[in-house]
């Protein structure tokens, strides 16, 4: 139970760079690997399995690969493991499981449990029921916990000085580039029909990105209002300032099915959808 | 217990490049690599192609103009950002006469429903290995503010995961099992 503050994304926001660079690179053909401008420092990577999903980290800049960088990575993992202990619906001993069995009350749980339940309720209202942590009589806040947890876990990494961060939990990620002269993180949007290919590349400097779809686990997303499985979309990718809401809206957008691009654009989200037939459609941009 | 006051202070900066729209344009790209690099606006959904239309952007960052003229590599220098250069459009394609020598080629700017767009491709061994968009729409003042732009869908069947040069992968929730064979796993192991 390390370092969570009550809520606010603790990051001292960098003073707004008046005009963020577009960060387009024009590559030379023959160079084998230099993916970015020569000035771009190398990327340090790490990956672990937590919460039943792969957690991948990419760091660039001053603390990439340093002791401080690795320390922050371990803090991030510790936070995710703590969240898993509290919120896992797979662990019978978790607070959420005990709460679901009515063995404890919300007041008995760590205060974050009440936070998450409230967040789930706000998500339900805000998405007009497309998102619901109460399904089939069971309490399953997994859909809000993931983005919320990563947003907390990334804090020690964002506190690293002059260091670019991209932290992904199962494909939902927080990205930050600290130096305007360094390129944005390039995020490949997986082809739902072929996980070895990407359908699009989104360059993200500062923000969060989440994708929902069917490709990996089969039909795990149903419309809570109807019980139906959406059939039009392959995947929905949402870009937002907050990963908590990018994650919620990607799920709800997928449930919105054919209305997803319209609905998400109305919510001032940006991103793309990949239709079941493979076509890519941007929205909100 | 309320809180979770999600204060979203971040500036969001997004640039979207869309690949893989399997349509007729793929063919035109391939053809392009052979003789000329002017492929702007070849995206299938823009019906108002006007190749060579002067970009509406007012900034004249010269940084990216020289990147395109000689096929050498030069990062589109993050000058002041908001827009890309209008002059880079003019210097396009000039280097492309010689049957797709290796290098980077920049097309003339074209109008699309998203605004003016210019495309640069990188050719290696006669193959397109990369597609970049040094000029992108700057029409919407709000978009300019947050620096998020829609770009036309760029088609290139030759861009696979490897050559797309990506840092991270996003897809439907990857489970630990699926991860072993995933693109993300490959990236993590490559340590690039």
Image: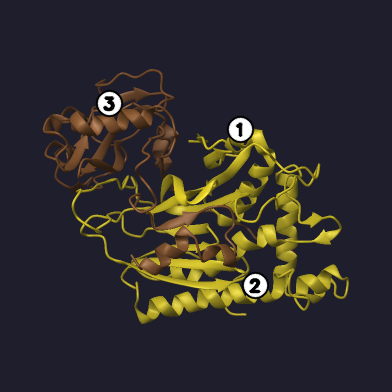
> What residue sits right under mark 2 in the picture?
A83
Q: Nearer the viewer, residue B169 or A284?
A: B169
Q: Quadrant of residue A138?
A: bottom right
Q: Which structural element holds mark 3?
A: loop
Q: What's the residue at 60%, 55% (across, down)?
A: A216
How far across and how far down the image is residue A150, in percent?
56, 64
Vertical order, B142 against A148 (above or below): above
How far across and how far down the image is residue A193, in percent?
54, 46
Q: Residues within 10 Å of mark 3 (few under 14, many from 20)?
A: many
How far across and how far down the image is residue A92, in percent?
78, 76
Q: Are marks 2 and 3 on the same chain?
A: no
Q: Quadrant of residue B173?
A: bottom right
* Chain to which the residue tagged by mark 1 belongs: A
C-alpha span from label 1 to label 2: 34 Å
C-alpha span from label 2 to label 3: 50 Å
Q: What's the residue at 34%, 46% (across, down)?
A: A18
Q: A236 left or right of B14?
A: right
Q: What's the residue at 75%, 76% (across, down)?
A: A94
Vertical order, B17 against B162 (above or below): above
Q: Tell me if label 1 and label 2 are in contact, CB under 8 Å.
A: no
Q: Are marks 1 and 2 on the same chain?
A: yes
Q: Nearer the viewer, residue A231 or B77?
A: A231
> What residue sits right under mark 3 in the picture?
B55
Q: Which chain is yellow?
A: A
Q: Which chain is brown?
A: B
């Amino acid at each position: 139970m390390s370092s969570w503050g009550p809520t606010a994304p603790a990051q001292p926001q960098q003073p707004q760079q008046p005009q963020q660079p577009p960060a387009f690179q024009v590559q030379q053909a023959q160079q084998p690997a230099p993916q970015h401008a020569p000035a771009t420092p190398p990327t340090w990577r790490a990956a672990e399995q937590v919460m039943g999903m792969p957690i991948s980290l990419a760091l660039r800049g001053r603390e990439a690969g340093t002791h401080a960088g690795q320390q922050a990575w371990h803090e991030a993992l510790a936070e995710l493991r703590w969240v898993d202990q509290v919120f896992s619906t797979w662990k019978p001993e978790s607070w959420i499981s005990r709460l679901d069995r009515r063995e404890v009350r919300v007041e008995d749980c760590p205060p974050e449990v009440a936070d998450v339940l409230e967040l789930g309720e706000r998500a339900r209202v805000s998405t007009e029921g497309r998102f619901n942590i109460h399904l089939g009589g069971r309490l399953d806040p997994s859909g809000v916990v993931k983005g919320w947890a990563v947003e907390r876990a990334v804090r020690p990494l964002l506190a690293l000085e002059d260091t670019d961060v991209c932290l992904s939990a199962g494909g939902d990620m927080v990205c930050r580039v600290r130096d305007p002269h360094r390129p944005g993180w390039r995020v490949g949007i997986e082809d739902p029909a072929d996980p070895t290919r990407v359908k699009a590349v989104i360059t993200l400097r500062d923000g969060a990105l989440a994708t929902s779809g069917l490709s990996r686990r089969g039909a795990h997303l149903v419309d809570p209002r109807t019980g139906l499985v959406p059939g039009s979309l392959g995947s929905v990718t949402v870009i937002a300032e907050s990963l908590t809401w990018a994650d919620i809206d990607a799920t709800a957008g997928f449930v919105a099915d054919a209305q997803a691009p319209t609905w998400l654009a109305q919510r001032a989200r940006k991103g793309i959808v990949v239709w079941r037939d493979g076509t890519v459609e941007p929205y909100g941009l | 217990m309320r809180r979770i006051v999600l204060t979203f202070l971040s500036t969001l900066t997004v640039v979207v490049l869309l690949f893989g729209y399997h349509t007729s344009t793929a063919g035109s790209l391939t053809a392009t690599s052979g003789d000329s690099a002017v492929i702007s606006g070849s995206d299938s959904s823009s019906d108002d192609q006007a190749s060579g239309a002067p970009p509406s952007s007012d900034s004249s960052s010269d940084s990216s103009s020289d990147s395109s003229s000689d096929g050498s590599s030069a990062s589109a220098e993050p000058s002041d950002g908001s827009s890309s250069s209008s002059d880079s459009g003019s210097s396009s394609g000039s280097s492309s006469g010689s049957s797709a020598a290796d290098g980077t080629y920049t097309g003339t700017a074209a109008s699309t429903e998203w605004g003016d767009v210019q495309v640069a491709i990188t050719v290696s061994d006669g193959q397109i290995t990369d597609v970049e968009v040094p000029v992108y729409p700057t029409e919407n003042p709000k978009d300019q503010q947050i620096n998020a732009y829609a770009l036309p869908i760029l088609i290139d069947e030759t861009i696979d995961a490897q050559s797309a040069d990506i840092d991270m992968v996003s897809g439907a929730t990857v489970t630990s099992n699926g991860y072993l064979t995933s693109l993300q796993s490959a990236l993590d192991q490559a340590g690039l």
